[in-house]
Image (cartoon, rainbow, N blue to C red):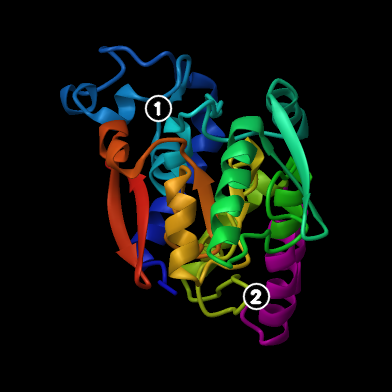
């Protein structure tokens, strides 16, 4: 797995601080006056959803680069029109307005946007003909609520503090102070510690960013993402791509995103190929 460079960590710390101070100034419906000349010509920006809350600070621009492929999803999908879900009510309002579908796959309930589910079921039929399976990796492989993203964040942060306090790298008072903050407020604090190699990924040897998405930013909240059990199988990845499911987060190998178009159409949406671990990922070309 990749390790996050110190310079990128510094960018995250600055970025999330800017979000805390400046999110109220977000603009929607990006216009020529909102974007630079280069951005006006960029296919990715041109394909963002109508009413999209265009980033106005480094934080949101950074998150758009990391997780932004989902915002240009097609094929009947409804992508979110803003970058960070602020709380459970924000997530619920979005998810309740979707056409949703639920299926029991291999004993696990999977809930996705209807278009994404239809494509997944078609991919499963193709896989079965090839004597292969496509199944969820776990109970939280598809739809998630905001609390689940917070719980995943805490599942890295809390054990991390136990470890680093025990080794004298972080004081008990500092750990208590940071854990008392809201999940959103914790993000810059955790990344600040990681600049000194006090890492909070599950393995404690790399950034938490490569272990879980910051609260409110997971693609699973859009109901257009699925963690696939058989992600190591190249033929499974090919079949999923045949039905509009692609890998879009380079640090998350089991993670697939429903984009709803053929692969040849992805560059027209402003996405580019990035290769990692012998796989192709489609990420924003920005």
From the viewer's perspective, tell me whether residue 101 is left or right of residue 71.
right
10 Å crowding of disc 2: few (<14), some (14-19), many (20+): some
> Residue 173: x percent and y percent?
75, 67
Circle 2 residue: 170
Magenta stretch encompasses residue 217: no
> Residue 208: x percent and y percent?
56, 65
Using the rendered view, name the quadrant where residue 171 is placed. Answer: bottom right
Q: Is residue 248 visible?
A: no
**Which region shows up in magenta?**
153-181
For the N terminus, the image quarter is: bottom left
Tell which of 20 and 171 is nearer to you: 20
Please tell me whether mark 2 sits on a helix, a strand or a loop: loop
10 Å crowding of disc 1: few (<14), some (14-19), many (20+): some
Q: Residue at x 50, y 74 (%)?
A: 206
Q: Residue at x 60, y 53 (%)?
A: 124
From the viewer's perspective, tell me whether residue 170 is left or right of residue 92.
left
For the C terminus, the image quarter is: top left
Q: Earlier in the sequence, mark 1 or mark 2?
A: 1
Q: Nearer the viewer, mark 1 or mark 2?
A: 1
Does residue 265 sit above or below 243 in this rendering?
above
The residue at the far bottom in this view is 167
Magenta stretch encompasses residue 170: yes
Answer whether labels 1 and 2 touch (C-beta < 8 Å).
no
Circle 1 residue: 56
Does residue 52 sit above or below 150 in this rendering?
above
> Residue 47: x percent and y percent?
35, 25
Tell which of 68 and 103 is nearer to you: 103
Q: Is residue 162 visible?
A: yes
Using the rendered view, name the quadrant where residue 20 is placed. Answer: top right
Q: Residue at x 40, y 27 (%)?
A: 56
């Amino acid at each position: 797995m990749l390790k996050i460079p110190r310079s990128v960590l510094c960018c995250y710390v600055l970025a999330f601080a800017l979000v805390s101070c400046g999110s109220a100034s977000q603009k929607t419906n990006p216009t020529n006056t909102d974007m630079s000349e280069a951005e006006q010509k960029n296919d990715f920006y041109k394909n963002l959803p109508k009413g999209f809350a265009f980033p106005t600070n480094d934080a949101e621009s950074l998150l758009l680069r990391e997780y932004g492929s989902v915002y240009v999803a097609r094929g009947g999908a409804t992508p979110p029109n803003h970058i960070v879900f602020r709380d459970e009510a924000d997530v619920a309002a979005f998810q309740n307005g979707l056409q949703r579908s639920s299926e029991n796959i291999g004993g696990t309930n999977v809930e996705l946007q209807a278009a994404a589910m239809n494509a997944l079921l078609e991919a499963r039929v193709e896989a079965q003909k090839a004597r292969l399976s496509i199944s969820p990796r776990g109970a939280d492989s598809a739809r998630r609520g905001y609390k689940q993203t917070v719980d995943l964040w805490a599942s890295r942060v809390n054990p991390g503090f136990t470890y680093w306090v025990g080794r004298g790298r972080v004081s008990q008072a500092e750990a208590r102070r940071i854990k008392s903050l809201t999940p959103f407020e914790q993000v810059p604090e955790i990344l600040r510690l990681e600049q000194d190699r006090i890492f909070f990924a599950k393995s404690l040897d790399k950034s938490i960013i490569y272990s879980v998405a910051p609260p409110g930013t997971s693609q699973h909240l859009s109901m257009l993402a699925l963690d696939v059990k058989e992600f190591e199988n190249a033929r499974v990845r090919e079949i999923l791509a045949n039905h509009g499911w692609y890998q879009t987060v380079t640090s998350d190998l089991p993670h697939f995103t429903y984009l709803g178009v053929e692969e040849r159409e992805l560059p027209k949406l402003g996405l580019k190929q990035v290769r990692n671990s012998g796989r192709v990922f489609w990420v924003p070309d920005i």
